[in-house]
Amino acid sequence: MIRILLIFGVASVLAIEPCCFADDANDATHSFTDADWPWWRGPQRNGIADPNQTPPTKWSADENIAWKSSIPGRGHGSITVVGDQVLAAFADHDREVQGVMCFDRKSGKPVWTADVHKGGFSTKGNKKASLASSTVACDGERLFINFLNAGAVHLTALDRSGKKLWQTKICDYVVHQGFGSSPAIYKSLVIASADNKGSGAIVAMKRASGEIVWKRERPKTPNYASPTILHAAGRDQLVFTGCNLVTSLNPMTGEPFWEIKGSTTECVTSTVTDGTRVFTSGGYPKNHVSAVNADGSGKVAWSNPTRVYVPSMLSRDGYLYAVADAAMAVCWKSDTGEEVWKQRISGKAFTASPVLVGDLVFVTSETGQTIIFKSNPEKFELVAENQLGDEVLATPTICGSRIYMRIAERVEGTRLESLVCISKVAE
């Protein structure tokens, strides 16, 4: 399956400090709180949430729902939460508009809608793809979002009120399965990627202006991974998988630290690390999970043929946790790849990535079942199962003891998409 609908590390941590980044003279430094989720896979970019929060472990359509709001069209990007704003990319097929919606965090009421592209829609690609599969990234002052439109991928910056600040073309794009790469923020830069069969590229731009700082051409093959900033082997690395390569770049300059052959052609997942190794996975033309030493030695520490094609993995305390596309939860030792346990779980297929809160792993199936199990390296330990909606392809966002879930329901034969806030107490 292809996470072109994507929803889509940094070393695994037990406690998350407020995330901040240093900027150039044109950008003030911004700090996020533990209650924020500013970009794809959260503050640490690895799917690990603030461990001190207490989100519900039980919910249904009638239980522990704080609010529910409609989102037009179809989109699979995850939800971004910063301050009192909840943000979602959308693709409204009736109006043929791609854009960003902002909701009030407390009430769920729509605050503003920013139309980014009008027209230029294409229905080519995998049936599970959407035209709003990227996740909004926020640097505190601006919002950044990628869209495939009219045969090209563009990154657009908005201010916090939805006003368009600038837009930069990443490259032309030949659709194979779809597009869903999310932008990554690093210091004064915002970084976007658009691998495809035409003219793929990874591009870093100034957050303030959209001016291109560096651009790296990519092989002409389809691929769907997002650029991921990891701290591994003692330095920050932009690690990118796919196109039959595992690539590490200096995120400030685009210069290569190292690059080896070893991934499959088409990858979807966002890489994670234990600080020593980076963990990659892919599903076409072959399935693989592998651990590559992050020191530039080119050594592959271990690999196996498990199909973890779409859901990204979790790395914690020397163990790697994954949910295979075909509903199998797995735990490996991160240094050797030894399989500790494997367990079939509910749900026929998974696209959403797991989120870790304390010692609990939350993962949602394509049919709306959220399975919660413990990150226990000794055995699989089921905590709860919950059902909400008929279809879920976006990774849930968990922050401030609330779960923000993008769901779809069939109402009288019509697919309707909603943003749901799950909370123990509806405020």
Image (cartoon, grey):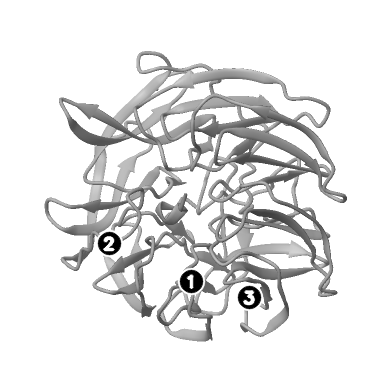
Q: Which of marks 3 and 1 is nearer the N terminus?
A: 1
Secondary structure, mark 1, is strand
- Indicate the position of residue 323 as horizontal and vertical percent values: 62, 38
Q: Which mark, residue 124?
A: 2
Farthest front residue in view: 285
Residue extending farthest top: 62
Tag 1 residue: 193
Which numbered dot is residue 16?
Answer: none
Q: What residue type is labelled 3?
A: Pro
Secondary structure, mark 2, is loop
Count residues near mark 3 (Cα–Cα under 10 Å), then give few for <14, some for 14-19, many for 20+.
many
Please name the amino acid that badge 2 sits on.
Lys
Category of crowding for the residue at label 2, using alpha-carbon neighbours closer than 10 angstroms: few (below 14), some (14–19), many (at least 20):
few
The residue depicted at 58 percent of the width and 46 percent of the height is 33
Residue 62, picture quadrant: top left
Up/down of 110 relative to 402, above or below: below
